[in-house]
Image (tube, coloured by chain):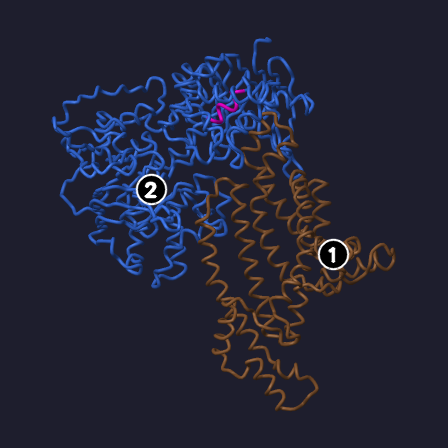
Chain colours: A blue, B brown
Amino acid sequence: MNNLLVNIKDLTIGFPNGGEIFNAVHHVNLEIKAGEVFALVGESGSGKTLVSKAILNLLPDTALIRSGSIEISGEDILSYSPLELRSYRGKKVGMVFQEPLTSLNPALSIGMQLSEGLKIHSDLTSAEVKNECIKMLNRVYMPNPEEALKKYPHEFSGGMRQRIMLASVMLLKPDLLIADEPTTALDVIVQKEVLDLMMEIVSEEGIGLMLITHDLAIVGEYANRIAVMEKGRIVETGNVEEIVKNPSHPYTKKLFSSVPGNARQEKPRYEDTEPKPPIVNAQNIEVTFPIKKGLFTPDQKFKAVKDVSIKISPGEIVALVGESGSGKSTLGRALLKLVDTSSGSIEVLGTDITNLSDGDIKDMRQNMQLIFQDPFSSLDPRMRVEAIVSEPLRHMNNVSKPEKKQIVKSTLVEVGLGNEFIDRYPHELSGGQRQRVCIARSIIMKPDFIVADEPVAALDVTVQKQILELFSELQKKRGFSCLFISHDLAVVSDVSSRIMVMYHGYIVEEGQTNKIFANPVHPYTRALLQAAPKLPGHDVSLPDLTTEILPDNLTFLSTENIKDDSSQLKRQFLYDLGDGHKVAVLPTER
Amino acid sequence: MIAYIVKKMLLAIPTLFIVALIVFCLMRSIPGDPAMILAGDINDPLIVEQIRKSLGLDQPLPMQFFLWGKQVLSGNLGFSAMTGEPVFETMSKRIGVTALLVVPALILSVLFAVPAGLYAAWNQNKKGDITIMVCLIVAISIPSFWMGMMLILIFGVWLGWLPTVGYVPFGEDFWQAGKYMILPVISIMLVEMATITRMMRSNAIEVLRQDYITHARAKGVSERNVLLKHTLKNSFAPTLTLIGLMLGSLLGGAAVVETVFSIPGIGRLLVDSIYARDYAVVQGILLFVSLIYVITNLLVDVLYPFFDPRVKL
């Protein structure tokens, strides 16, 4: 039995709650062998992070280990003294956290944070430590490692920070690496890079990896074995392929069926039966932000949205997809005139809103609403649900208070919340319930146009599915038009009829959802689709890209072109491949 | 960085102008005629009128402001109506005394408060934390004049270890001067220390919850280094702002302690001058204090990036 890297037996962790003890982890048994990628899967609050923290003996002070044992390489770590624990942590087991933005100390240089662990666990001289750090940074493909050592975390992107995290943990050559949702905060392409890198290092070193995640597609693509946790219990465990093919526990089945894009069916494509005037018609809009420079140097300009045209017909859901920083949220806000455009025109419901006064736009606002990403910060914690949902009604002077309350109640019912929720505060609601309240608040005035900015990105996968279904249902019933912003192509494929792909402020490809998925043309769209992790058996191989689709005098507006952002980009345009499927191109110089 | 400092200094000009205007108007709206006060028992309207003229108080108010402003811009803060001394000279003597009182008090407060705050945060809601917090609440609640009087009573009168009240310049007798300073420094320190400790504690509690602290522990970093290396710098940054504000307000407002211990500092000069309606001195002091505020805050801003590299000037 001693070849087991991790051997957890009958682990129960509780928290005192009033006079009683609430068990957050129930009799968990877990075994991980060296060289194995083990996935611990569950939704938020299922106790998976607690189990991982218990392995490092880093549980919060209030937590009580009520029963069980944790053996790492045959040693009982629960009986370790504080000194033994310190030499165990990092050296035997390393941990990579979810948020690369908060898991590196903002006040200390990268070099200091990397070398710290080595200085604790080895007798190397400073020069040797520095050498090791540079070697490790090279291994995680960090450009200019020597320079990087002197820099601070905020100078790196999220993906780079996660590489630094990985480097700092792997420097100590642990036997087991715990990765707690290591890529949840990253864009899909970066996620793939980081996970591939992690797998590469793990298999080179032959160590064990415990991957904690809620994303089953990642599990399917990377893990050997899986344990599914629900409410503190492990409900199912086994080989990944078997469980994906044949989940036995109802909760596992539910999890797998909730993976977005999993049950992709042919969408009835949105038909322009009788051409109606579009709800939103934006032409060549640009949004620029000033970058403040010194006192005497003129401000530079940053273009967040570049020459974008977008039309949304009545009752249509258009998805806007792109990585963080691509300008998709800015574009969404510009359509609602929450940020000002620097050029171009935006018509909403036939009115040009670009030059409307503040007073006039206020009247328009009831017809255009926004749903935010994070239901935890978009609801005022000091207002009850009734006050939150009824707030938009305060302009209706001819409606009495009891009538307003009735409207609130019926709207809440529409989003699936009973009357008992009316007096609750946001902190008394779960994430999904909060997002329902947000939806209720934005539909109560019966708007014609809604911008939904990553409405399910912060939710667990089963809740995500429910909210998406609710959203589609409400949309069918009420017939509003919607710009659905997301970084997740799988989510988008379930709700939208048309997709626009955005990269660094440009629309690089747009078209019917089916078309984009079946025949993506632009290199960036293809990269996005390829990077998305898929469950085994759901691999869709992309059709080969035929360059002949473009006439000789045109080339794709490549990501390199866009990053260069030279003046020649003024000549880019969207080339129609037919049937509304358009791709960004540049005329070739001859 | 240099551009930032220049910008801040330029912004200080309108600030100081507004302060000057407010101070000027406030002084003139307090009832009481400086000429009458200066004349004292001499109840001769002619003499009072003469004094008024010599002080320039017979001019209309906007003219008075204009004349004063012109004077200040040429580097002359005017003369005290009471003593006839130049305001700038009087002030600079007094500010030195106050600085000798306030700066050591603040430095000592920080030296005690930072470790105390860190320790309390690390022991949040445990015995050590609660003990420190109770002491802090007591220290904050006791008014500084009462604290001063109690210190005089205990150490000066009963125990006889230290002199009670008074001031000896450091140039005259260094040891004696130091002895006289101990009690006033302590009575200022206790209140300031309590405030800084509370600030430090709540910042450190916030920092200790961050992922990077857990990450440090997961690497095997000792608790001592978790506090000293990872928590200290991050939680000190916001505290620095508070300390800057304190320094500014103490330099102008240590009047209570200065009065209790009979120390000729600038706070007492300010209070005395207000009673005497010594317009030139009051205006000069307040203008000077605002300038100190601007400078200390600038200093804080310049130091800030060291503690939080994300901040760029």
User: From the viewer's perspective, is residue A285 above or below residue A227?
Assistant: below
Does residue A165 show up magenta in the picture? Answer: yes
On the image, the x and y values in percent for residue B125 come to 67, 42
Residue drawn at 74 percent across, 59 percent down: B169
Q: Quadrant of the C terminus of chain A?
A: top left
* SS label for mark 2: helix
Residue to which mark 1 is pinned? B170
On the image, the x and y values in percent for residue A368 come to 30, 50
On the image, the x and y values in percent for residue B140 come to 69, 55
How far apart are the two marked residues, 1 and 2, measured between alpha carbons?
64 Å
**Residue A157 visible (yes or no):** yes
Q: Amino acid at mark 2?
A: Ser
Q: Quadrant of the N terminus of chain A?
A: top right
Q: Residue A75 is drawn in which quadrant?
A: top right
Residue drawn at 30 percent across, 32 percent down: A494
Q: Residues within 10 Å of mark 1 (few under 14, many from 20)?
A: some
Q: Residues within 10 Å of mark 2 (few under 14, many from 20)?
A: many
Determine whether, in the image, residue B97 is placed left or right of residue A24.
Answer: right
On the image, the x and y values in percent for residue A138 come to 44, 20
Which one is in front in this view, the residue at disc 1 or the one at disc 2?
Answer: 1
Between residue A62 and residue B258, name the one nearer to us.
B258
Q: Chain of mark 1?
A: B
Residue drawn at 66 percent across, 57 percent down: B99
Q: Residue B278 is drawn in which quadrant?
A: bottom right
Q: Amino acid at mark 1?
A: Phe
Disc assigned to residue A507: none
